[in-house]
Amino acid sequence: MKNCFAIRAENPRIFEQRSPLTPDQVQTLIQNNGLKVIVESSDKRFFKDDEFRAAGAVVSTDTTDANLILGVKEIPIEDLPVDKACVFFSHTIKGQTYNMPLLQAVLDRRVTLIDYEKIADSQGRRLVFFGPFAGLAGAIDALWILGRRLQDEGIPNPFSQIRQALEYGSLQEAKSAVEAAGEWIRNNGLPETGKPWVIAVTGNGTVARGAGEIIDLLPVTHISAPEFKQLQAGNSFDLQRLYKVVIDCDHFVKPVDPDTQFEWQDYFQHPEKYQADFEGYLPDITLLINCIYWDVRYPKLVTCQDLKRLFADSKSSGLKVIADITCDIGGSIECNQRATSSANPCYVYNPETGETSDGVSGAGPVILAVDKLPTELPVEASAFFGQALMPWLPEMTQADYSQSFEALQLPAEIKKAVIAHHGSLTPDYQYLQGYLD
């Protein structure tokens, strides 16, 4: 039925509280655009069924009448409809091995798959995303885990009063807790460990800016990557200061050819001409928050060998926690061996053996690798995401998905995000056939 879309209940086997739209946003679409909205009943979603009913939606387990089905995470293969248009984060565009069976099922069931991750403007800038909230929740959790690790080492510290992001009723409540830790630092100083206190954030996109918003609530001294190097060279860190450094790709990679200079556009177009230049930072970083985009074409930022060299002498490293917010398994943070959940968010990576153990105790850095961090701030994350999605929904809901891809009437930004249609990969995504094969 045209002018009707459904919000599906997320997979009950995963921790997911977000919704692509809030009840208030659903009400606006119903009242202003005359859309019909079906919401699958869910007791895991932060927003309750009754809130959607009050907004004018139909709460039901039957989404047959919907012309379009909205989700957040992947729809399990067994729940995929037939000949329906579905919008969700498919995690297939890099040819992710674990989701190739899902993509094949999408083709077999003739699903029109629209991926939020590929909704972008003419410059390739993403338009519908949770990005800042991965950074916000990730930084809160990173400080929480840092506090736990220091406590485990017998070091009283101000970060131990910070809790996991999901334990707060709102983002503001979490921010107040971080601010309280900052006030503790102002009044009492930082513990003496013989190493600098440095929080390093990699990248400068929306995820990194979200993380920085949290870290900036602490009494940090901002330094640039070159200033960090100068302090290292002179062994002149003030051990009672908390430093924050943002390290972007112009300072974490270098050209393979020593006679050339780093160039932004050249790096993005020809990453094979560059190599990582990050290992030197590691000895004086306390908490590393990794927020960069990465795929297999790009250098790895922190390799397992880097960490093995660093931790060969336990006194040479102050590195306590690596929060890999982008969570590419074996990717830019090579020691990220597995994704974790909010219920069991971190593990220690042993650089000598390559083994991992849940929790914060053990030889090596603690790795935070939660792959669904925005769900720990479900109210604000859903509202932010829904606000970006709302303008596209009237046309998406009115589209005739029975037409061929060429005839399909969708805004250009949405049509570029159609990965599969009528059992075939669309032209821009034909490369995925190689991964399916």
Image (cartoon, rainbow, N blue to C red):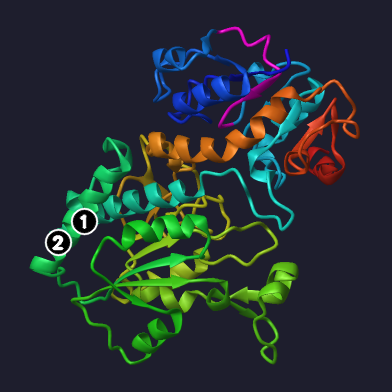
- The local secondary structure at tag 2 comes to helix
Q: Is residue 199 above or below residue 148?
A: below
**What residue do we see at 48% from left, 41% from top?**
384
Residue 81: where, in percent of width, then height? Answer: 70, 16
Q: CA distance from mark 1 to mark 2?
A: 6 Å
Q: Would you say residue 76 is visible in this rendering?
A: no
User: Relative to residue 177, is residue 97 drawn left or right?
Assistant: right
Question: What element does badge 1 sit on?
Answer: helix
The residue that mark 2 highlights is 183
Residue 92: horizontal and vertical position, in percent?
Answer: 69, 40
Snapshot quadrant of residue 380: top left
Q: Is residue 88 above or below residue 135?
A: above
Quadrant of the drawing holding the N terminus: top right
Q: Which residues are magenta?
A: 61-73
x and y, in percent, of residue 61 in the image: 55, 8
Name the residue: 69% across, 26% down.
86
Relative to 393, 131 lies left or right: left
Identify the residue at horizontal 68%, vertical 9% (top origin): 65
**Quarter the C terminus occupies:** top right
Q: Whole-percent x and y of residue 32? A: 58, 24
Of 126 and 388, nearer the camera is 388
As shown in the figure, which amino acid type bears the numbered disc 2? Answer: Glu
Q: Residue furthest left?
A: 187
Q: Residues within 10 Å of mark 1 (few under 14, many from 20)?
A: some
The residue carrying mark 1 is 179
Is 184 rendered above or below residue 50?
below
- 424 to the left or right of 166: right
Question: Is 148 positioned to the left or the right of 363 in the image?
Answer: left
Q: State the residue at coordinates (64%, 17%).
A: 79
Q: Are marks 1 and 2 in contact (CB under 8 Å)?
A: yes
The secondary structure making up most of the magenta span is loop
